[in-house]
Amino acid sequence: MGGSYLTDALLFLVNTIFSIYILLVVLRFLLQLVRADSRNPVSQFLLSATGPPLRLLRRFIPGFAGVDWSCIVLMLALQAIELSLSSLLSYGASFAFAGLLLLSSAALLKLIIYIFMFVIFVQIILSWINPGTYNPITVILYQLSEPLLRPARSILPATHGIDFSPILVFVVLQLSLMLLVRPLADLGRALAV
């Protein structure tokens, strides 16, 4: 029974450390994808925190079509390592490669969707509390959310000064969780055995 306490503590540490670093790499990838200002202090922090492993990977995996493939490989590898370690600590077994790859992809897509939901939600709250405020974080929030909100605004324009486009984006993101991420995770669990 004492071993389970140690296992729980190790599992907590593995999940926490990997989750934080995966979040940093995902944020870096998203900021590169939306072409956010790289001179922003938030961007600078993400560049320095995630730089060493990406510099190594870029020697072997070049970018292509404007996508940083080394960043994608790093995200998938870190997520796969986290899932494998968690499985080993919890059940004493690891996943089959195909299942692990699908489970890692599903976990990353879920994280990306949650990041966009969080960013849009925070931006909405900030627009109510203190609209028009400039600081590095609000700039990053705007740069991350605008690629999703701009097309939604063309479909659902503001009515009487109220912007309903975030509601449309939340609905699409939630449907993506239900119709894309969950089936991918279920298929990954089926193949992981």
Image (cartoon, rainbow, N blue to C red):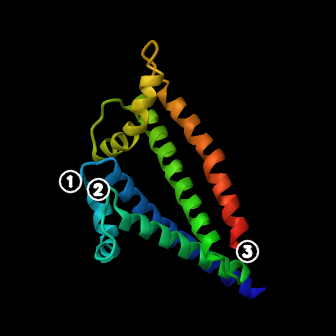
Comparing labels 3 and 1, the label whose residue is closer to the camera? 3
| In contact (CB < 8 Å): disc 3 and disc 1 | no
Q: Position of residue 53 (x, y in %)?
A: 35, 75
SS category of the residue bearing label 1: loop
Instruction: Determine the residue located farthest toward the top in the rendered image.
Output: 160
Q: Amino acid at mark 3?
A: Val
- Considering depth in this image, is 77 or 162 the residue closer to the camera? 77
Instruction: Determine the residue located farthest toward the front in the rendered image.
Output: 65
Residue at left offset 37%, top offset 43%: 141
Crowding at dot 3, Cα within 10 Å, few <14 / some 14-19 / many 20+, comes out as few
Q: Position of residue 94 (x, y in %)?
A: 66, 80
- The number of callouts visible is 3
Q: Which residue is mark 1?
A: 39
Q: In the image, which disc is placed on residue 9?
A: none
| In contact (CB < 8 Å): disc 1 and disc 2 | yes
Q: Which residue is mark 3?
A: 193
Residue 47 location, quadrant: bottom left
